[in-house]
Image: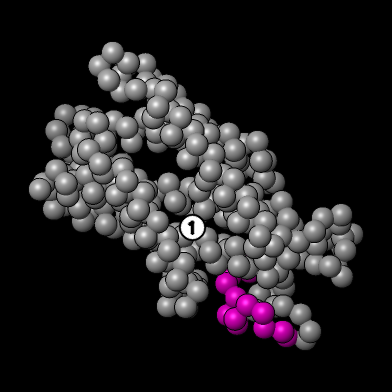
Amino acid sequence: MRTSNPIFSRLGGANRDAGPAGAYPREPLGTSVGGGLTGGYGTNPYAPAADTDTDTGAWAGRSAVTMDDVIVRTATTLGTVALTAVLSWLLLPVDEANIGRSYGIAVGAALVAFVLSLIQTFKRTPTPALILGYAAFEGVFLGVFSSTVSTYISPGVIVQAVLGTFAVSVGVLIAYRMRWIRVNQRFAGFVAAAATGFLLLLLADLLFSAFGAGNGLGFNSGGLGIIFGVVGILLGAAFLALDLKQVEDAVAYGAPREEAWLAAFGLTLTLVWIYLEVLRVLTIFNNDN
């Protein structure tokens, strides 16, 4: 299975090509066809190579990933983001005396996080040091950014944004487990198209703002800004559903245990996206009222 999440699209590495491009299981996970898991794949997309242990469904010398592995590594990655965000909030104040230094460090951290995320995205195998490094620098940026929003724009909005992110995540998880969301190839194609349009509009807004159009296309204030932010939240929720499907498939089809780090990386990227879009909506809403 592939997903529009750039990190999860790497999950499975070269073995991903064993199945049809962009395929999703058409049968429920766990369906046994001829004594093994096949779903809608022609072959298992995580199938081990000929020189590996096919009896265990794992790569030679490696155990298969479990849901516990994904949970532990996701908690570690998100915990790193949260810890560095809190520390940067406390140690990099955004008052008038320190605002320049804090902003400089935050921008530098954002650039480093972006570079690390790109490196990991295009690597064939996960590197925990890269993933945790990304989480640490992302946390620094989020801490300063959140402190700035709370201090100068909308006091108290950060707690609301965190709770909103939690609510969206739990809602998607419940909807996914209850099968209210059908994650299939059509769903993934729709999300990819919607995300492309969203990012193009965001880029256009930034360009208009940079070249003197004031408020850009108006996506950062008023009713249009709230609508744009809500669309961003819905896209984040869709990404999260795709991520959950990818994790479920990886566990069911016996991906190697190290792929749990890629799952943690992808989930962290999605949750950061949701947090920033929730923060956008709440900030605009609070300022308009």
Task: Return the residue at label 1.
Answer: 4
- Mark 1 neighbour density, 10 Å: few (under 14) some (14–19) many (20 or more): many
- Which quadrant holds the N terminus? bottom right
Determine the image quadrant of residue 239. Answer: bottom left
Q: Position of residue 181 (x, y in %)?
A: 43, 74
How would you classify the magenta stretch by its main secondary structure?
loop
Q: Nearer the viewer, residue 289 or 264?
A: 289
> Magenta span has 160?
no
Q: Position of residue 280 (x, y in %)?
A: 26, 46
Determine the image quadrant of residue 27. Answer: bottom right
Task: Give the magenta-colored segment's residue range.
Answer: 17-33
Q: Position of residue 92 (x, y in %)?
A: 39, 22
Q: Position of residue 138 (x, y in %)?
A: 47, 36
Q: Secondary structure at mark 1?
A: loop
Q: Amino acid at mark 1?
A: Ser
Residue at left 66%, top 75%?
41
